[in-house]
Amino acid sequence: MQRILYFVVYFIPFVIFAQEPSDLKLWYDEPAGEVWENALPIGNGRIGAMVYGNVSKEIFQLNEHTVWSGSPNRNDNPNALKALPEVRQLIFDGEYKAAEELANEKIISKKSQGQIFQPVGNLELTFSNQEKFEDYYRDLDIGNATSRTSYTANGVTYIREAFVSLADRVLIIKLSTDRPGKISFTANFTSPHTDPKIVAKTDHEISLWGKTSDHEGIEGKVKFNALMRMKTTNGKSVKRDNAIRVDNADEVVLMVSIASNFNSYKDLNGDEMQRAKEYLETAFAKEFPQLKAEHIKKYQNLFNRVKLDFGTTDASKLPTDERLANFRNTVDPSFVALYFQYGRYLLISSSQPGGQPANLQGIWNRSMKPAWDSKYTININAEMNYWPAERTNLSELHEPFLKMVQELSEAGQETAKVMYGAKGWMAHHNTDIWRITGPVDGAFWGIWNGGGGWTSQHLWEHYLYTGDEQFLKSIYPVLKGAAQFYSDFLVQHPNYPYLVVAPGNSPENAPEAHQGSSITAGSTMDNQLVFDVFSTAIQASKIVGQDADFADTLAAKRKKLPPMQIGKHNQLQEWLDDVDSPTDNHRHISHLYGLFPSNQISPYRTPQLFAASKNTLLQRGDVSTGWSMGWKVNWWAKMQDGNHAFKLIKDQLTPVGINKGGGGTYNNLFDAHPPFQIDGNFGCTSGIAEMLLQSSDGAVHLLPALPDALASGYVEGLKARGDFELVRMEWKDKKLVKATIKSNLGGNLRLRLPNTIERIETAQLIKAEGANPNPFFYIPETASPLVSKESNLTEIDLAETFLFDVDTEKGKIYTLVMKK
């Protein structure tokens, strides 16, 4: 007989909360100087700007989301199809190095290896006679997405405010003082591009026009135009050469619009000059208070959905760079909350519907040739950028990435057909604004063909969090196409009874036993990806009512995939053969994809694989590149080890250069690979959310990985699968005190709780048994692992949890109070 409990139900309106304003600022007591990583990022998903806060020469380094080198192009290698059987045979024969060499010759693209995200230039404001200053302060307020610089020079207090408007497609800068007639400066554009056209059009307006670079044989055809126009209160402005001189003004407001001729990855027929003019004219018709208010309103509609408070200590009173320097050796819990919210701020600022996805550097780049071209590395980094989107209540911001996946599915059909003779679509490990899908950078990295499979899972994740069936119907062909490719590409391994991906690899890693080559057949990550691609296509086909026979075919082939294996070192094997080294500290731990972001490995459903995953994490170690540490925060959260997850947060929030052989964080809290890669910021934000709430393992699990250092606090606004929203959750001394959840879709809410309930009224809460009947929590069965005879694996003792079901109604809010 089921035990019946009760749940408190309140029919109250949804309320949005926000952190205290003082907790939401990055602030400093000195300018950025010449160090780009000291400057502060602002953006609106189309325009990015880095604000240096320098006194004598202020710099706003400018980016626009479509300013990339090159032009529409394809980079498939048609020689691949003929060479494929020989490459496979070499792999099956154990001739990995020979297979890699042949792949380099016949499979890797001989065309573009990917184009470059490039800067527009700088807006520079030069102030005379301000070399000596005092009372200096600058900040980035992520509570309202504005930056501010203030200082005193010659007895006058100067204030600069800046933001890139989410409501208007312009950068807006306001200069003011506490005394009239004291603003004098020269404004000019600079650009690193070849032959930019910089013209002072009037006494109030400057234009910068340019064209992006040719790269690797692809002509640069993106044309861009930046326009700066200013409003002055009193004083005088006059154009001088290609600049504007302002003297003795009371106040100045500058606006910068930037636009390009980019329409789509196939079309460059836009009018960059007309667009820039229209954006500027629209904004210029408004006064500064209106511009600022509209920007903040639109920003806070997104940002204020989530509030997080871990408590505050005196350590929080220091400038941000000092807090960063001290964090690993002090108690500063609000710094973790700030870093979490900073990740959300960066996503709002670099990814907006209708724009390009956040790339390796988000939307901020000063270099004409940045590391890895600042493009989209889709064997982990681009996906990591969007891990916070659904779980931290920013679902709309997933759209640019989801659109890119749909565009890749178009471009990748030809790659699948021409290179591999397969139906459907695929992509390799990198892409760019032109949606290339061919293999680049050499076979060691580029032979991986899981880019389509992995990115397509974001479409499914968006559906699981939102329940949007119209969206699912619209993207079902993309899910089906990813499955079609693997269905055709899988091949019978001659030495094992499995269908395998060959060639493939475990991204960017290679065992010594394979001659130092990464190329292989049936790597664990490839198997996990195919499992997910087949599973989501099967589930989606049932929901949309299409392709039942094809779904049956996928189910049959899924049974023939290699199961995960536990090796002689008690590790989760990375390859089909047991050749992992327990001293391998490689930054990629791709075979733990099955633990996170996938859910094939579970403490409750697959305890042996779960224990083996922990051993793999311990063997790989903690300190690594910045993004790798961000991923590890998520993994340790999934391991339900909050203290180890927090240790990784401390490692990541360490100034770059201190972690020997690893990454860290720059003074502006940008993640350091090094160099700067924004994925680590997003990865850690996701990991902190996973420490507080998880929903991928059949239930909404509250406080699964709470560390001792964050023993008390509250959070509001996190999301779970099935569109359940955590209105508010409070905990004290690592015990859940109270939780309020809104059911936006209705259906069964299965809760996994860390402690028992004290007060229950009104609604029935039933002790859960069996599988969760809510379809958004359905989990395909993971095959039993193969375990090495040399393994002496010990399963992990888990903390006790309590599992309950409540049948919820759409739109209602449910509150439970826990036993103290």
Image: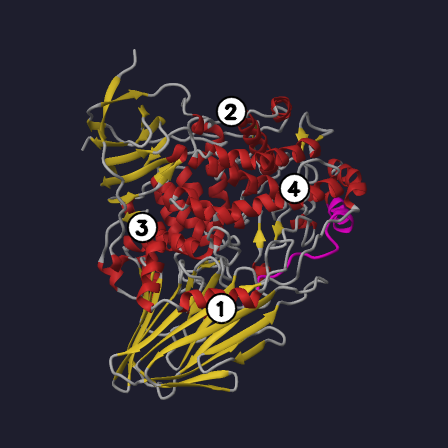
Q: Is residue 757 left or right of residue 417?
A: left
Above or below, comparing residue 687 to residue 215 in the picture: above
Question: What residue does disc 2 label?
Answer: 781
Mark 2 or 3: in front is 3
Determine whether the residue tagged by mark 4 lies in a helix, strand or loop.
Answer: loop
- Picture quarter with the C terminus: top left
Q: Which residues are magenta?
A: 97-119
Task: Pick whichever of labels 4 and 1 is earlier in the sequence.
Answer: 1
Name the residue tied to disc 4.
426
How far apart, in angstroms, are the residues tagged by discs 1 and 2? 49 Å
Q: CA distance from mark 3 to mark 1?
A: 27 Å
Q: Is residue 82 above or below residue 210?
A: above
Disc 1 marks a residue whose amino acid type is Leu
The crowding category of the residue bearing disc 2, from other C-alpha atoms within 10 Å (few below 14, some 14 to 19, many at least 20), is few
Residue that numbered label 3 is attached to: 304
Q: Nearer the viewer, residue 62 or 617?
A: 62
Q: Is residue 108 magenta?
A: yes
Q: Secondary structure at mark 2?
A: loop
In whole angstroms, how far apart are the C-alphas of marks 2 and 4? 25 Å
In this view of the protein, which residue sits in the foreground, 273 or 84? Answer: 273
